[in-house]
């Protein structure tokens, strides 16, 4: 997964088809292991981004994919945090 909310798939497109059915205003979150969030991955026009990830070390991380004006998790909240940060 990259910081734009895009993932490197296996070429089947099932992930993108599933995300196409989700309203753009929905907070889409993917659980990741530490180290699986990278700066950038190759992308194609049909790729659909998610808006956040959850990792063991960082908790909830909002990505750059949020559409303007979409509701999400305010940065000052503790949603997704497990270590009292």
Image: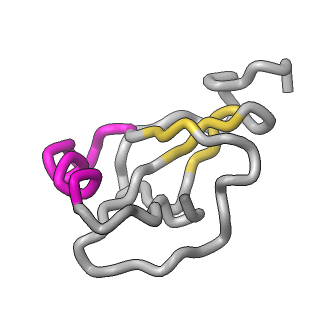
Does residue 10 appear left or right of residue 23 in this picture? right
Above or below, comparing residue 49 to residue 81 in the picture = below
Q: Start and end of the magenta stretch? A: 13-27
Q: Position of residue 4 (x, y in %)?
A: 51, 66
Of residues 66 and 16, the one nearer the viewer is 16
Q: Is residue 83 left or right of residue 70?
A: right
| 21 within the magenta span | yes
Q: How was this image coloured? A: secondary structure
Which residue: 48% across, 59% down?
Answer: 5
Query: Residue at position x 38%, y 38% from top?
Result: 27
Residue visible at 59% across and 63% down in the picture: 3
2 left or right of 13?
right
Reply yes or no: does residue 60 show up in magenta: no
In the displayed structure, 82 sits above or below 31; it is above
Screen quadrant of the N terminus: bottom right
* Residue 55 location (% of width, % of height): 68, 37
Looking at the picture, how far across and down is residue 48, in whole percent?
Answer: 30, 62
User: Foreground: 81 or 2?
Assistant: 2
Residue 23 occupies which quadrant of the picture? Answer: top left
């Amino acid at each position: 997964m990259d910081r734009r909310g895009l993932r490197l798939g296996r070429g089947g497109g099932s992930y993108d088809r599933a995300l196409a059915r989700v309203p753009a205003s929905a907070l889409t979150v993917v659980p990741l292991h530490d180290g699986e969030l990278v700066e950038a991955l190759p992308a194609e026009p049909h790729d659909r981004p998610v808006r956040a990830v959850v990792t063991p070390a960082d908790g909830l991380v909002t990505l750059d994919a949020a559409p303007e004006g979409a509701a999400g998790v305010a940065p000052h909240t503790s949603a997704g945090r497990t270590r009292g940060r």
